[in-house]
Amino acid sequence: MRFCVVELAGQSGPMLAVQRDGGVVTLDAPATLRGALDRYGDAGLIQLGSEASGPCLPFEKVTRWLPPVPDPRSFRDFYAFEQHVKTCRTKRGQDMIPEWYEFPVFYFSNAGSLRGHQEPVKRPASTQTLDFELEVGCVIGKQVQDVSGDAAEDAIFGYLVLNDLSARDLQRQEMKCMLGPAKGKDFATAIGPWVVTKDELADKRVGPGRYDLTMVARKNGKELSRGNFKDVTHDFTKMIERASRDVTLFPGDLIGSGTVGTGCILELGPETTGGWLEPGDTVELEIDCLGTLTTPIV
């Protein structure tokens, strides 16, 4: 099942909906995934979506795609693909550190700056090196703490496409101070267009918290990057185990995988990608089964 939050022509305000047959069916539920999970629980929300019997409205009726979880209590972004980490460290003249292999690391991103599918993102005035990052995101479906293995996977409600937009010059400056990234990621993260429940990915599952999903990035219609989520070093069960240690995760919390190998301009090099992102550019991130997330830069 695919849950989204949309605004529709002729209706006021956002509505939670399920994607079905080339359109959406709205639900009589809170207008965010977090609110609906809080009210119904993960199993109850899936049942509500499966029983939705309203009219299927064509995508043309959608006037705005909002982030499915615009208000997570927390947003952790991990650093889980070895190829990305190794390439970026090599570009900085650094070797891999053994601690990276011992446990998945993350930073807290801005849970208040999420953007939806097709929603424009303004390039920060203070950056000249704006980048995209091609990631898988997961949404927590139930309250958990200190979980691992099957319990960690059971905590996942579903998955989505995530674009961790990055101001590389700001990131580079602040990380010299041994903190961050923070301001370099503060302004916007795009997610969507919907959250796909994990049961829909069963035939793509290759292990706990790991799926055979091709991941593609395009800039202005030109393919720049192609990877696969199955190559992740620290799968989502390990990420959730780390995130939930001594801490409660709540329904609607958002977790990012980190960038797939070759999934950003920093890795590929601006000289091979037509430069950093500029106003007028459009980024499309496509992941098997999860859809395509489009972000215009303004």
Image (cartoon, rainbow, N blue to C red):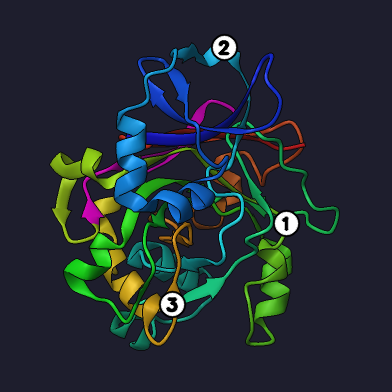
Q: Position of residue 157 (x, y in %)?
A: 34, 52
Q: Amino acid at mark 1?
A: Phe
Circle nearer the viewer, 2 or 3: 3
Q: How many marks?
A: 3
Identify the disc placed on residue 49. none
- Which of the pair 58/221 is nearer the observer? 58
What residue is rendered at 47% in x and 30% in y? 27
Q: Is residue 157 above or below residue 23?
A: below
Q: Earlier in the sequence, mark 2 or mark 3?
A: 2
Residue under label 3: 248
- Which residues are the magenta region? 210-226
User: Which of the marked residues, 3 or 1, is nearer the chain's N terminus?
Assistant: 1
| Secondary element at tag 3 | strand
Q: Residues within 10 Å of mark 3 (few under 14, many from 20)?
A: few
* 74 displayed left or right of 287: right
- The C terminus lies in quadrant: top right
Task: Residue at 29% x, 69% y: name it.
Answer: 234
